[in-house]
Structure formats: C-alpha cells, structure tokens
Image: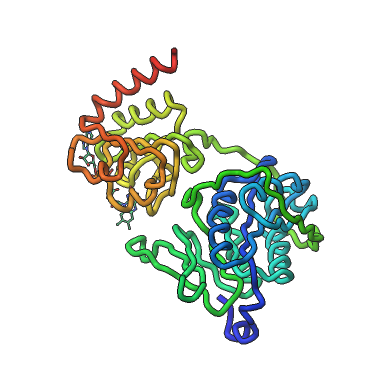
Amino acid sequence: MADKNTAAVINTADYKGIWVFMEHAEGELRSVGFELLGQGRCIADQLGEELSAVIIGDHVAGLAKHAFASGADKVYLVEGHEYEHYTTDAYTIAFADLINTYKPSVVLIGATNDGRDLGPRVACRVGTGLTADCTNLAVDEQTGLIAWTRPALGGNILATIFCPNHRPQMGTIRPKVFKQPEQDLTRNGQIIRVQSKVNSADIRTKLVDVIKACTAAVNIEEADIIVSGGRGMCSTENFKLIEELARVLGGAVGASRAAVDAGWKPALHQVGQTGKTIGPKIYFACGISGAIQHVCGMSSSDIIIAINKDPDAPIFRVSDFGIVGDAMEVLPALIEEFKKIKEG
Ligand code: FAD
C-alpha cells in the first residue's frame, strides 16, 4: 500500500476512466480480458466515464478491433519486440508509465498467472493499493467507489474492499466471474499509441523456452463442458466414469474439494471458492452435494446437470436438470448414449 506522503498529494478528481488490461497469447486476446471489458462497460456507463483497453505486445495492433467490439472506447497500445512475451519487468514499466501519464480511475486485471504477477507490481509502482483475486466488483452507489469483493479469512467470509484515498483503484479479478459481452464488430474507437521506454537492460529475466502443459484435461477455466465428481463417486476407480464421460463429450474433468482431498484428482481440477471459478456451457455435478463453497465456483455455468442419489441434495436447487440415482449406474448409461450419438 502507498504511504501517507503519497496520500497527501493525490487528487482523486484528476483520475478518470476505467481501464482493462488485455492479456494475449499466440496472437489472440485471452477471454478474461473480454469478460472484464463487459463489466468495465457497465461500470463506465454508471460513472459516466470512458472504458479503455490496454494492449502491450509486439505487432498486436490488430487486436484492438476486438477490444472495441467488446465495448472499449479507446485502446492504449504499447508495441515493441521487448514485449513479445510477458516479462514482469517490461510490462510493469510500460503499464506504470501509462498509468502515471494518463491517470485512469480504475484498473481491472485478470487474476491469471501473469495478472497476479503484474497487478501488485504496478500498483506498488504507482503508489496505490490492489484488491487481489476478486470474485465480484460493482460501483458503490453512495460513494461512487469500486466495491471489490473477495473471499477472506480462509474463504469463510466475503470481504468488500474500497480504495478511497489512492488512485487508480486496482484489482485482479478471477476469470469466468463475468460473462463475455456480445461482440459488435461495427463498433470502433481511438487507438492511442504510446512509445516504449523499456531498455533491454531493464529486463532481468530471459524467456528460454515455452513448454506447453498438457492442459487439455486440466484447463477447466476454458472448457465449454465440465464433468465434475464429488465424494459420492466413492473411489479413484469410480472416478474413471467422470473422466470417460468428459472424454466422450470433449470436455474437462472437475472435482469437489472432497474428491481432491481424497486424492482422486489433483487440486488443479478443484471447482469452488478455494479452487477455480468456471462458467462452462454445460456443467455435470456427479455425487456432489452442492455446498456453498462449491456452488459459488460453478453457478454461472449456462446449464447445470446434477446426478445425486439424495433427492433433497442442495445441488438440485441450483440445477437446470436433475437425475436422482446412483452415479455408478447413471454415468455408464449416459456414456453409452452419448457414444451412440457421437458415432451417428
Ligand atoms: P459431500 O458433501 O460429502 O457430498 C457427497 C454427495 O454425493 C452427497 O450429496 C450424496 O448424496 C451424494 N452421493 C453419495 N453416493 C452417491 C452415489 N452413489 N451416486 C450419486 N450421488 C451420491 N468445496 C469445493 O468443492 N470447492 C471448494 O473450493 C471449497 N472450498 C472450501 C473453502 C472453505 C473455507 C471451506 C470451509 C470449505 C470448502 N469446500 C470446498 C468444502 C465444502 O464445504 C464441501 O465440504 C465440499 O464441497 C463437499 O464435497 P462433495 O459435495 O463432493 O461431498
């Protein structure tokens, strides 16, 4: 957090505009940036301010049109070969310079690996605070401040945090908390090109190699279909039914914390408050009771299908379709039917 001296010189009225940091990989913007533009647009309209996207990279000007299509009024573009790959040093220097020059009021960054690295560094450089890993954000009607919400005290409470005296108000927000807005490709905006001020000597790390993880089965944040299993699956052996249904549907495998604690799946698969927040098109919850800490991680799924042998299980209250039955009987039947559909 900034010290008292910094607080004394800040005039919050000098800071205007909502900014979203747009991550990109392999020539494409990552979905969390679009999700934040959608929510950023709502906030900007409420506050009567502009929404801007920040794109830093090498030869990335072509990405600006997608930011405009998702609601941005402006794009701040920093290009240079030193930004080809994300590095903490180069991106921190560029982003902090942008903020010091253009003085946005609010900065939103995805709580991804890079975003969690970049956000606090930039906040520290520009002398403000940052609320990390938010699960919601909104405008406080009384003060016009951003109300940042995040789990606290080991996830047992949700804390709402304000940043009244420093600017910008900054936070990292979990992917999939907000839906992506509809793209309007007729929208346009202003590109503000900003010269890079980073020397290669400023960058203390060197990217040697990019090793792709075998994420197909693990990257539940990007998956359209997720089949999740809980304690009701009873064993590693039975959990194979979850994996088989996910494979047949071309989806990813999720797990409740109870299933992760039992060692049936690694923690990367955990859905929920202390796991991942996901928003697939279809979510299967098999042998999962529907505890609030699980539901808060998957409730924004478009369609939720629950399989549980207890007709009173709380999961059915948040489900679009419910199957009351033994998962060890229902899952093989579903797998067989979906296989038949797939084979035509
Ligand atoms: P259970 O609650 O034991 O439910 C098992 C369900 O399976 C039951 O509904 C039962 O009827 C059903 N069942 C049993 N046998 C069968 C069968 N043969 N066929 C069909 N159904 C069957 N949990 C998470 O998932 N994610 C989190 O991120 C998370 N974070 C937490 C953070 C904190 C601070 C705390 C305190 C808890 C957290 N939890 C989290 C744990 C959470 O409270 C629950 O304990 C957990 O979600 C329960 O997992 P479960 O539904 O698999 O197991």
Q: Position of residue 115 (x, y in %)?
A: 58, 56
Image position of 135 with respect to 224: above or below: below
**Residue closest to the eye, 317 or 256:** 317
Q: Position of residue 297 (x, y in %)?
A: 39, 49
Q: Position of residue 142 (x, y in %)?
A: 46, 75
Residue 234 in sight in this render: no
Quadrant where the N terminus sits is bottom right
**Residue closest to the eye, 44 or 301:** 44
Among the 4 quarters of the image, the one containing residue 49: bottom right
Count of picture labels: 0
Among the 4 quarters of the image, the one containing residue 152: bottom left
User: 76 left or right of 216?
Assistant: right
User: 290 left or right of 92?
Assistant: left
Picture residue at 68% right of the left edge, 44% below the top = 186
User: 22 left or right of 288?
Assistant: right
Residue that lies at the very extreme toward the top in this rendered image: 344
Picture residue at 61% right of the left edge, 49% below the top = 70
User: 272 left or right of 203?
Assistant: left
Image position of 99 with respect to 272: above or below: below
Picture residue at 21% right of the left edge, 30% below the top = 326
Q: Position of residue 27 (x, y in %)?
A: 69, 41
**Residue closest to the eye, 263 or 129:** 129
Picture residue at 29% right of the left edge, 21% below the top = 333
Residue 236 in sight in this render: yes
Quadrant where the C terminus sits is top left
